[in-house]
Structure formats: C-alpha cells, structure tokens
Amino acid sequence: MLTTLFVVDDDQVSASPQGFIGFNHYLQDYPKLGEPKTRIINLCDTERYLSQGYYCSLLAEARGHWALPSVKTINALRNGGATLWLDASSLKCAMPKEDLSLVVTMGQADNAEFQKIADRVFQEYPAPLLALEIVPKKQGLKVQVSRLSLNQIAQEQQQACLEVLSQAAQTKWRKHSGSKKYRWDLALLVDPNEKVPPSDKGALDRFVKAGSKLGIRVQPVEAEQLVQLNQYDALFIRQTTAINHPTYQLATAAEEQGLVVIDDPESILRCCNKVFLHDAFNYQKVPSLKTVFVSRSDEATLDQLEETFGYPVVLKMPEGSFSNGVYKAKDREELKTLTDKLLKDSALVLAQEYLFTEYDWRIGVLNGRALYACRYFMARGHWQIYNHGSSRFFSGGFDALATFEVPRPVLQAALKAAAVVGNGLYGIDIKEADGKAYVLEVNDNPSIDHGVEDKYLGEELYMQIMSEFLRRLESRGQ
C-alpha cells in the first residue's frame, strides 16, 4: 500500500481541495507509527529559502518519505528559476514559431503539441507544477523553468491541474533521472566554435564517461547556458581562459557560490599574465630563461636589449595562449617595430632569450602531482610548436611518455613552477638543453586531446582528473 499526501502552505488549506493538508499538519502528525510507504507532493511555495515548502521536502527526505520536488530541485529553481537549452531536432518535437508559455503538471504539458519539451524539462527538474517560458533561438530552444505553487495557477487552469495531480496519486511515479544514480553534477564549460580548444570532442566524451563511473554527471555547457550556476556542484573549464572574458567571470562566480572549480579564478589570474609568472619564477627560484620586462622602446632600451640578449630575441605579450602573442626579432629594425606595436596594447612586454630546441616538454600537473608528460615538436620550418601563419603545417608532432621517463630536472622544474600558481590542473611548458630545464610558462587549462596527451595513460588520465573532482567534492561535503 502506498499513501500520497498533497501538502500546501498553511494559509492555502481553506482554499485547497478536500484531502489536501497544510504544512503544519504534516510537520506535527507525521511520520506515524506503522505508516505505509508515503510520498509527498509538495505544492507549497518554495521560492524563499527556508520557507514552509523548503522544509516540507527537507523533512520528507529525513523521514524516509518520497518527496516531489526534492530539496535539490527546489534549490536549483530558486532565485528566478533555471535556464535550459534544448535541441528541438534531437527531441523530434514541434518547434515553436514564437515565444510560448507552458504549465506542466506532473510532467504533463497543458499543450499536448509540446509534450516532448515538457518531458525533457521534467526529467531535469522533477516538480509537480512548473512554468515554462520557451523562446526559439537560432541555436535551439531557450527554456526558462520556474516552480509554481497551487495558488499561482490561474483559476481556469486549476481544475485541469488538479485532475492530473489526482491521477498521479493513483499511479506509480516515473523515475526521470535514469537508471544511473548521480550524487554530483559538474558543468563542463566548452566553446564549440573555438579554433584551438583545450580539449577535442573525443576527450570531452571521455571526461563525461569517467565522471559517470564515479557518480558525477558531467554536462557539457556553453557560457550562456550557465545562468544558474547553483544547480551544479562543480565547474570544469575546457575553454581557453582570459581575464577580460566570461571564463574568468564564471570561475569567480562559481567559486563564490561554493562550487569546486578547475580552473579556479586565482589560477586563471596568475597563469594568464606572463609578467606575474616570470616575476614569481625569479622570486621562487624556478629555473627559466633570462627574461626582462620592457616598458619603453627608446634607443637606450633597445641598446640594453641588444647587449643583454643579442639576436634573435623573443618578445611576448603578457597574455596569450597556443603560441599567440609571441614574436621573434632578428635585428634592431624588427625589435623596434615589434616593441612599438606591442606596447600600444600593454604597458609591459616581456623580452626573453631565444633558445631553439627540437621539442618543448609539457608536464601535466594536478594538485601538485605530475600526471602526464608530452613532448611537442616544432611545426615544420618554424621555431614554435604552433605556426599560426600556416594551415598545412599548423603544429608539429608529439609523443607521450610516462612521468617516470621524464628527466629529473624537467620534472622538478615543473612541480616547482606549478606550486607558484596553486593546486589546480596545469600544463607546464619547459625547454631542456644540456641537462638543464627552463620553464617557459604555466597554462591553467592545458591541452588534453584524445590520442595526444592521453596516449600513454589512456582512459586513466580522465579517471584521475575526475577522481580529483570527486575528492574535492567529498572533502567539501554536501
């Protein structure tokens, strides 16, 4: 036998149908000795934190009652609701031609033509009464989801909603979360339009699978879809980061809301500016190439650079990734032209000694531990691993090795450089010559592509990274 209780706010009891009970009735009279299995359909207002509706579901879960909505769903839909992006073609449903409002009762839409949209939303946010505001966009359907309490339903719709609720009380509830039970939700931030993203689709798919094995639901999302960060427990940024960019803003907001974040905003702040890195390298005695900061391009400065470095000399913008913003001056004329150009965009430019090697090391470090190692060879006919001026020979070859095969000076330099930044996931770029290691930079969201960085560890690389998320989530508690 199964008992279903409809619970409403105390001030709504008199206006509710017979058989509905108020919150205080549920609070004081339940659980009962020897009671049958009980499910609670919570129709209270839950918008306010610590409201009667919030406590109704919280108490139901504590009492072993099956509550709809759960506390997790309530939290996800507070503060204006949540935004969900849907692909109408994958749902194989009708595409609204204009903005549309739906009321969804126990997963049933008040307009049957758009039932598949209601099914998908109810799967994500199982609650007895939902309001959907659907806006057709070029990239799909933008669905604003919010909870409704019974008294918010228009009078002419209430009877139809009550009939659906009554039917639901006589049937088994569908479990919409799938057969897999997830304890944690992780947002995987990506940009499908990025030319050189930190991870390709093969790697992203493997992050999703690795998370699933550990009880983490990994959902690839774009920046504009993260309107409600609090519906997630963690944020994993797999989009090229920058300070004046949504990636940094989202990382900051996520950290403020208590999410586990990689890349955390402090790591982004430190890694995105080579001025900070090289000053910190010098102070912390991290082995690196001779580097000076340039703030002017007058003749005296050029004389000093020539005396310090000779030619060629490398010039770097403080911010840049994938070899962007890095230039080589072969003579004084080029040095003058490049410094003039770069100082228009930045008050400081880095000048660095030139050291050619056939390859650069990339050591992946996670929470202070070396995770993977790669050697990236220079692009054909070029002095860097990426040649942005060539579409045919854009990058050179690579090989992946076990970390125990990495020369000790390279490994030690990588760990020392990572410690300067923090305890996140970093890719440390290092040149090696004559048995010495020279740190070039620390990347806060290093490349992890299927068939490249995972060539040696395979699926274990993704499991290790997701396991670190799990460790941090468990340490944080929920």
Image (spheres, grey):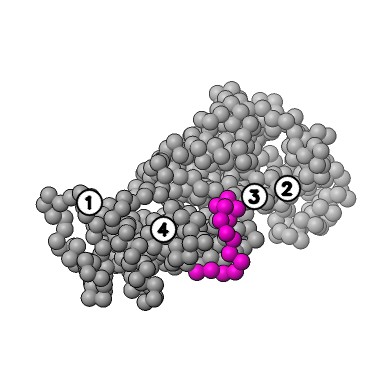
Question: Mark 1 belongs to which amino acid?
Answer: Leu
- Which badge, 4 or 1, is on the more N-terminal residue? 1
Residue hosting label 1: 2
State the image coordinates of residue 89 (x, y, percent, origin top left).
Answer: 60, 53
Judge by depth and name the residue closer to the eye, 447 or 433: 447
State the image coordinates of residue 353 (x, y, percent, origin top left).
Answer: 74, 40
- Which badge, 2 or 3, is on the more N-terminal residue? 3
Considering the numbered disc 4 on the image, is that residue within a helix, a strand or a loop? loop
Judge by depth and name the residue closer to the eye, 440 or 262: 262
Between the C-alphas of marks 2 and 3, the distance is 20 Å
Residue contact at pointers 3 and 4, CB within 8 angstroms: no
- Residue drawn 86% across the image and 49% down it: 334
Question: Mark 4 belongs to which amino acid?
Answer: Gly
Residue hosting label 3: 192
Between the C-alphas of marks 4 and 1, the distance is 20 Å
- Which badge, 1 or 2, is on the more N-terminal residue? 1
Q: Nearer the viewer, mark 3 or mark 4?
A: 4
Q: Nearer the viewer, mark 2 or mark 3?
A: 3
Residue hosting label 2: 324
Between the C-alphas of marks 3 and 4, the distance is 31 Å
